[in-house]
Image (tube, rainbow, N blue to C red):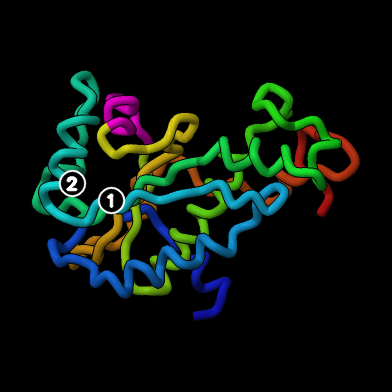
Amino acid sequence: MEFQDLLRRRRMVREFKPDSIPRELLLQVLEVARHAPSAGFSQGFDFVVLDRPDEVSRFIALTQDPQFPYEHLGTPDAPPCLVIAISNRPAYLARYSQPDKERFGLQSADAWPVPYWDVDTGMAVMLVLLAAVEAGLGAWLFGLTWGEQELMRELHVPEGCRPIGVVGLGYPATGAAFDGARFRSKRRPLESMVHFGRWQDGPSQL
């Protein structure tokens, strides 16, 4: 599939078939994350995959926000697979403690101007979202608002690592086509977000 076509087809899918994803295909989609850029080639992103019904049910039980319950989990059209994207901060601190990087003084998290463990994990997730489209799967990225610490303990995630989001994966439900009309806003035009030389309030001259 051509890259531009891939971009146009990428959407957040929230309605799925119940069919499970073959492990081989799932690993093929996740393999692209290995090619994401990372500061110092720290590669500080990990993925916990929940692709059994009991695992998904336990995830929902731990993370269901009592004030804002899930609308698309625990339903017949929910994704059969959840991929928890975890940023591995200790991997970055360890990498920048090595002889070729220690001169930058980034051995502690407070020294980093930007938490690149989160940035890089986000870039890895973006590759996974695109790979899912190419593989004929639907993908839905959502965040955790409840139960994060308990979930991390139960999944034995090491200290210092935390989730930046969860990707729901599965085969899109028949008829779950993208309906752009339900969005009040359209995509911003390029000239409103690209600023040459300085930030401009009006449209830039592209």
Q: Which mark is residue 82?
A: 1
Q: Residue furthest right?
A: 197
Which residue is label 2 attached to? 56
In the foreground, 205 or 177: 177
Picture coordinates of residue 8, whole percent (x, y): 49, 65
Per the rendered image, the range of residues in magenta is: 143-153
Measuring from the top left, give residue 26's x and y in whole percent. Answer: 33, 67
Q: Residue at x 46, y 67 (%)?
A: 31
- Check disc 1 and report its element: helix, strand or loop: strand
Q: Residue at x 70, y 47 (%)?
A: 39
> In this rendering, would 94 be left or right of 111?
left
Q: Are marks 1 and 2 in contact (CB under 8 Å)?
A: yes
Left or right of 114: which side holds 91? left
Residue farthest along the bottom direction in this orientation: 1
- Residue 68 sits in quarter: top left
Q: Position of residue 81 (x, y in %)?
A: 24, 55
- Look at the picture and state if 130 lies above or below 103: below
Q: Which quarter of the rendering shows the C terminus?
A: bottom right
205 lies left or right of 14:
right
In magenta segment, residue 59 = no
**In x, y percent, where is residue 83?**
33, 51
